[in-house]
Image: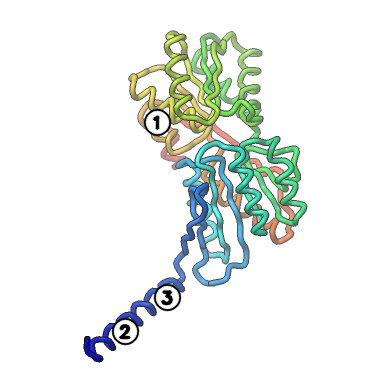
Amino acid sequence: MGNYTKLLFASLFAVAIIIIYAISQSGSPSVQVTDSLDVYPDRQLDENDSVPNMTLAIIYPFANPFYEMITTQIEQTVQSQSIHLIVKSPDELNSDQQIRMLESMIKQKVDGIAISPIDPIALVPHINKAVEQGIPVVCFEADVPGSKRLSFIGADPYQEGILMGEMIDDRLSDTGMIMVEGGLNASLHQQRRLDGMLDYLKSNTTIKMIELRYHEGMKAQALADLEEMISSHPHFNILVNMDLISTSAASLVWKAKGLSRMSVAFGMSPDAIEALQNGQLTTIISENESKWGESIVTQLVNAANGMPVTSWLDTGFQEVTVGDLEEQL
């Protein structure tokens, strides 16, 4: 190879390196690959400053399109701020994985942590550890009331349950049978929802809960539960879905079987919205999830800057039917 050809190749290689470097330093958000437990990679959400002023961590209970929706809201909220956002999620509902992720964020000395807790008992010492080391922690969706977390973002689950009882009563007119598919048996949040619903039904109706099951975070178990309950109780009137996994599983079963029985749910997830549009869900209780992202960022930034935060930021809740979707979306 001649000297001219070698010089040409060297020049082209140098130009390629310069281009790659220039792209890497551009203002677009960077994506960093993290460990195998992380469904979402770290995301740099700063368009104007190569060195972020603050690092915030968001820890979800498991991977689901619902949480991707919340992440999008958070990204939109911080897009004009110099914030490095780390988003983590176990690949399934696994408390040990979530705790390891929280501990990892403590070691990285992030400026604030928002977490949707799986186990409100097991997380207490780890949340306390973060706060004691100067890292503010806020909980969203579900709470860890026994911890030193600074704020809870969400609705009152007991009052949500009362509303669900009223919704069921409105459709069954005081008498009938319901089945319930729950998520984690250890979830205090879901237990409070269940308490509110059953207390209302017991005090105001003759409607009976004929079976309650928990899938413990496994969609396959939720599908099996529903198949067995429908077979055992063919004359049930309404299925109540207590969480995202239950709702998703019920929608599949309703679609496969062509069921016309009523199915109701907590949580306005993408799966729930689609099921409502397709007639596989009758109604939903929404916690105004479209506002969660902004609330999470506001509470974390204020806490990280030493400003006062609301100990309970009540998101409120409401019934949403297919006729309400246009306004909600």
Q: Quadrant of the N terminus?
A: bottom left
> Relative to 95, is 21 on the left or the right?
left
Which of the labelled discs sits on residue 21, or is there none? Answer: 3
Does dot 3 land on a helix, a strand or a loop? helix
Three-letter amino acid code at disc 2?
Answer: Ala
Question: Residue at horizontal 46%, vertical 70%?
Answer: 27
Observer-side mark, 3 or 2, equals 2
Does dot 2 land on a helix, a strand or a loop? helix
Observer-side mark, 1 or 2, equals 2
Of the two numbered discs 1 and 3 on the same chain, state the one appearing first in sequence. Answer: 3
Which of the labelled discs sits on residue 10, or is there none? Answer: 2
147 to 11, vertically: above or below: above
Which of the labelled discs sits on residue 187, or is there none? Answer: none
Question: Residue at horizontal 47%, vertical 25%?
Answer: 222
191 to 57, vertically: above or below: above
Question: Residue at horizontal 44%, vertical 31%?
Answer: 248
